[in-house]
Amino acid sequence: MSTQRHVDPVSYGGRVSTPLCVLGDFAWDVLIRTNSELLKGGDTFGEVMLTPGGSAANVAVWASRCGLTAHFVGKIGRDRMGQLAQEDLAREGVIAHFVETEAHLTGSVAVFVDHTGERSMVSGHGADFYLLSSEVPKDVIRAARHLHLTAWSFFIDPPRSAARVAAHLARGAGATLSFDPGSFQMIQEMGLDSFLSHTQDLGIDILLPNYEEGKVLTGLDEPDQIAERLTEMFPEALVLLKLDADGSFVHQHGISTHVPPATNNLVDATGAGDSFAGSFLAHYLKHGSAVDAAKFATSISAWVIEHLGARPEPDARLKKLLLEFTRAS
């Protein structure tokens, strides 16, 4: 069963289309943050929060917050948390195409944030990992001018086959494709050759790794070398290398540009890469400048890491950033 909301379509190249579709995971984050080191067998006070998340859903939300019409395709349980997922994306202005199932619960992730702001995650196998290729809404995918996928849809099958079907449908309809290869640990566990065998033939136009993922994919250490090698592995792809405290690195058409960080005040790194991807796509798909889009995305992700959770409620500062962008658009 799919749940869909109406969106006014736009004309693109003689066909009805929408700007962005993101396919992948919606999950609830159980966020645990301590102000001191967590000792084995010990007890401490901290913050425990339930927040909406899932890498793919986060990207769709940040694109929507930045004013780009975003669709989301994913799978949830027919349970209370699934109902809340639908309400969450509706509130965020994302047009959701959910497949619902009684066989699996809506996804959840334990997110541990240590006293330095670094995060570690343990992902459960919820409904989001069981999206089947037969359940992909083909008309939704074909109507997208751009499709975004995350590696969380590729580490196991399902949902790998569904993600690959979506990629080929989108490319066949003339859409562009972006891909976030996180996480480096899961790539290592899957095996680099296996990971590449499922991703290199997709025709990726925009690649959004962080530094650790870039190192694992290429075996190199320097950002410019990593980016150059990635364009060989994924021919002609625009590479956005996220460098955390060092900002980001844009590599396009053989030209590299370093974008400095907007903050080093790390509170919680959860969702930083997703907010970067969503805001980058919102800017780039509207204006076409990768460097300008990276600067904008860096400012958005800087705001995110100064707050708890992947999608903190916007405050006056973020609203000002978003308003300035939408006015400029």
Image (spheres, rainbow, N blue to C red):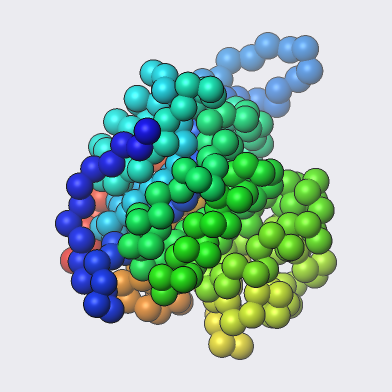
Q: Is residue 292 above or below residue 166?
A: below
How many labels, in total?
0
Q: Quadrant of residue 87?
A: top left
Q: Is residue 215 above or below residue 77?
A: below
Q: Quadrant of residue 283?
A: bottom left
Q: Is residue 11 above or below residue 115?
A: below
**Residue 17 or 112: which is nearer the viewer?**
17
**Residue 69 or 138: which is nearer the viewer?**
138
Q: Quadrant of residue 122?
A: top right
Residue 145 position in % (x across, y down): 36, 68
Q: Residue drawn 35% across and 55% down?
A: 140
Tell which residue pokes out farthest to the front in this image: 134
- Name the quadrant of the N terminus: top left
**Residue 309 or 277: which is nearer the viewer?**
277
Q: Residue drawn 25% across and 37% down?
A: 91
Q: Is residue 214 left or right of residue 1?
A: right
Residue 262 position in % (x across, y down): 47, 61
Q: Is residue 307 visible?
A: no
Q: Residue drawn 77% across and 12% down?
A: 41
Residue 131 position in % (x across, y down): 53, 40
Q: Residue drawn 73% across and 57% down?
A: 195
Residue 164 position in % (x across, y down): 58, 57
Q: Is residue 232 visible?
A: yes
- Name the quadrant of the C terminus: bottom left
**Residue 324 or 116: which is nearer the viewer?**
324
Q: Is residue 41 left or right of residue 278?
A: right
Tell which residue pokes out farthest to the bottom in this image: 254
Q: Is residue 60 left or right of residue 220?
A: left
